[in-house]
């Protein structure tokens, strides 16, 4: 069983933060009432751009809090 080091986890979180920032920028350029498909697991669900933006912001906030926890432990 492979263990994930904090630097590996930090790198993955940095990539996730960049992905979510790009998602937020893309979603911000759309009309808030526009319907889009949002991936949830292996499935895509139809939702509004506003709801997808809220979800992306929550994921971004979570990733930032996790990376801050790792950096505080160093």
Image: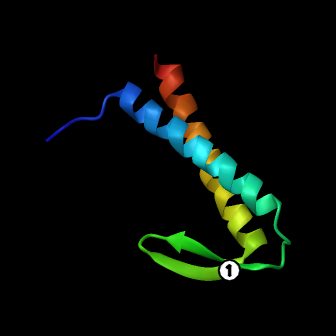
In the rendered image, residue 74, in percent from the top left (x then y), is placed at 46, 16
Which residue reaches farthest left?
1
Instruction: Classify mark 1: helix, strand or loop.
Output: strand
Q: What residue do we see at 83% from left, 79% from top?
A: 33
| Image quarter hosting the N terminus | top left
Q: Is residue 44 above or below residue 25?
A: below
Question: 31 or 67: nearer the eye?
Answer: 31
Residue at the location (78% across, 70% down)?
A: 50
Q: Residue at x 40, y 35 (%)?
A: 9
Residue, disc 1: 47
Rendering colour mode: rainbow
Q: How many marks?
A: 1
- Give residue 36's quadrant in the image: bottom right
**33 up-or-down from 68: above or below:** below
Q: Position of residue 58 (x, y in %)?
A: 65, 55
Residue plotted at (53% across, 45% down)? 16
Residue 57 position, x and y percent, is 69, 54
Apparent side of residue 44 relative to residue 58 in the rendered image (left or right): left
Q: Nearer the viewer, residue 54 or 30?
A: 30
Q: Is residue 30 above or below residue 28?
A: below
Mark 1 residue crowding within 10 angstroms, few (<14) / some (14–19) / many (20+)? some
Q: Is the residue 14 above or below the residue 73 in the image?
A: below
Residue 53: percent from left, percent from top:
73, 63
Observer-nearest of 31 and 69: 31
């Amino acid at each position: 069983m492979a263990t994930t080091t904090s630097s590996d986890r930090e790198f993955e979180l940095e990539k996730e933060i960049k992905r979510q920032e790009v998602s937020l920028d893309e979603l911000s350029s759309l009309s808030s009432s526009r319907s889009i498909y949002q991936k949830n697991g292996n499935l895509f669900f139809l939702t509004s751009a506003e709801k997808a933006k809220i979800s992306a912001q929550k994921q971004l906030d979570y990733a930032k809090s996790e990376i801050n926890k790792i950096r505080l432990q160093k």
